[in-house]
Amino acid sequence: MKHFIKSLAVATALISVVGTGSFASEPQKGGTLITGLAQTPRHLNPAVQSGVVTGAPGAQLFAAPLRYDEDWTPRPYLAKSWEVSEDGLSVTLKLVEGAKFHDGQPITSEDVAFSVKTIQENHPFKSMFAPVQSVETPDANTAVLKLSKPHPALLLAMSSQLMPIIPKHVYGDGQDPKTHPQNSENVVGSGPFRLVEFKRDEHVILERNPDYFMEGLPHLDRIVMRIIKDPSARAIALENGELHMSTFENTVRNIERLKKADGVTATPEGYAAIGALDWLAFNTKAGPLADKRVRQAIAYAIDKNFILNAIMLGNAQEAKGPIHPGSPLADQTLPGYEVDLDKANALLDEAGFPMKDGKRFDTSINFGWPSVKPQAEYVKQALKQVGIEVEVRASADFPTWAKTISNHEFDMTIDTVFNWGDPVIGVHRTYSSDNIKKGVIWSNTQQYENSRVDELMEAAGREPDSEKRAALYKEFQQIVAEELPVYWLNTLPYHTVYNDKVGNPPLGIWASSSPMDKVYLKSE
């Protein structure tokens, strides 16, 4: 347990609420930051809705127990200190005294208990708080989470994107939390900003919370999040200064364009916990792709350098395994599959698919959104070299694609899946044999089964010693990299683009799904 505590810097001594981060220059007070959102949020409450388009405004409206530095170090937020018991079966949070919700009501341990229960019952990421059996509230400022087993992912799950503390006196009124009217209007949180207006397809306007519990913050008076769905329109707005900042930009030609713009910085920093990967997923229960040798042959036939350089224009990293390369748990020793057509052909021969008149077999590849069409078309051309004829199938829309894939009615598909910080939250779901759920997208839609992989994930999910945990995940990564239920291609080319006027942009592990209370605008 001591290794776990040391690795996460969770000394039980009280830590400064403000944290120890330094600024590149003296922060300025006041001003309105204008940012972009690529989609319209369903609503603004991350307790019952996943996704970064909800996370960005939600992290400003709702505070969470912890916040994280760019090096994955947890820092105090609503919890001024925390302690993990020796057996790992309880986590005690000590809340900041005097913290209030936007309506002036005090934040208490009852709100923490209520928030955990609401997330457990309504959030799609069930693994985050699955081991939490109860939350004890011995006094107003102490919440004790009781666990059925050690759960090292819990502290990371206490971030703003995943565990906003919502007011019991608002959401405990008997209405469905998923459709509660105050998810979108008159939102009551305790974050650095309060809601002024959420106008669908137009904007989310936030104003400074004068009663924010972190002294001297936030620096900004307002944040205006303009909803601009067209990537080219956002790029123009960033170039001409209409937008100060936009996050989660992933159109590579626009990124290249913005890198050359005067007074603008485009950086991939800040997305390690989001952990978005593009991969080629296989139906492991049907046809030739049920044989791992065929899947390996496909990997040897694909030139990832072409994807990284010609398609991504150098704006993404190679992904060699299931854990994002920015995670401290990623196995950096995974060799990957260098292009080797001789190996690919030999494996296909060995698997019983000989070349006949220039062809071995037919298969198909589905994709659900236009951004991955270039990868799908490239895979078609790459596999033709080894006698595999691929039909590229574009879905009419995302729901059509999701239905096809979740019902296992596919051969291959290009997919984009997020790690969400800890493997327990975003990685296990793809490889666990218990998570083969027909009709549920982003479960184990590959129908992959390996009992040793199940054992390793279960053990790593409860192992408190950081070194032992990393070793378990290393073995897991080595196995799936050999069996290839999916073939990982690249990290998503997410970039944060910001004007030179922006000080302290959100470049931690959660990007704009973290509180922007330290962001400021520099004076002219």
Image (cartoon, rainbow, N blue to C red):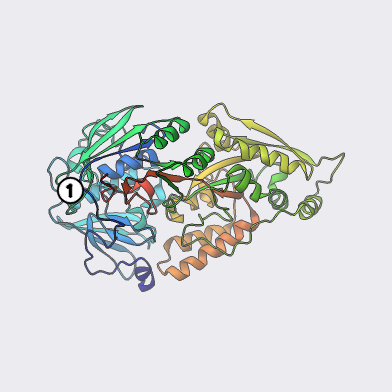
Q: Quadrant of residue 333?
A: bottom right
Q: Measured from the top left, where is residue 219 in percent x and y?
A: 22, 48
Q: Position of residue 296 (x, y in %)?
A: 70, 52
Task: Give the x, y percent position of residue 518.
Answer: 27, 51
Residue 452 is at least partly visible in this image: no
- Residue at 19% x, 50% y is 110
Callout 1: helix, strand or loop? loop
Q: Can residue 320 be seen in this snapshot? A: yes
Q: At x 78% / y 40%, what residue is drawn?
A: 361
What residue is pinned by disc 1? Answer: 212
- Number of numbered discs present? 1
Classed neighbour count for the residue bearing mark 1: other residues with Cα under 10 Å, few (<14), some (14–19), many (≥20): many
Tell me the amino acid under the disc marked 1.
Answer: Tyr
Residue extending furthest right?
357
The C terminus, quarter of image: top left
Q: Nearer the viewer, residue 107 or 234?
A: 234
Residue depicted at 38% across the width and 72% down the height: 3
In this view, the residue in front, 513 or 312, is: 312
- Image position of 25 with respect to 14: above or below: above
Instruction: Give the quarter of the figure containing the N terminus.
Output: bottom left
Where residue 233 appears, as percent x and y from the top left, is 44, 30
Nearest the eye: 229 or 397: 229
* Side of 123 relative to 255 (left or right): left
Snapshot quadrant of residue 194: top left
- 300 with respect to 22 (left or right): right
Q: Is residue 519 above or below residue 89?
A: above
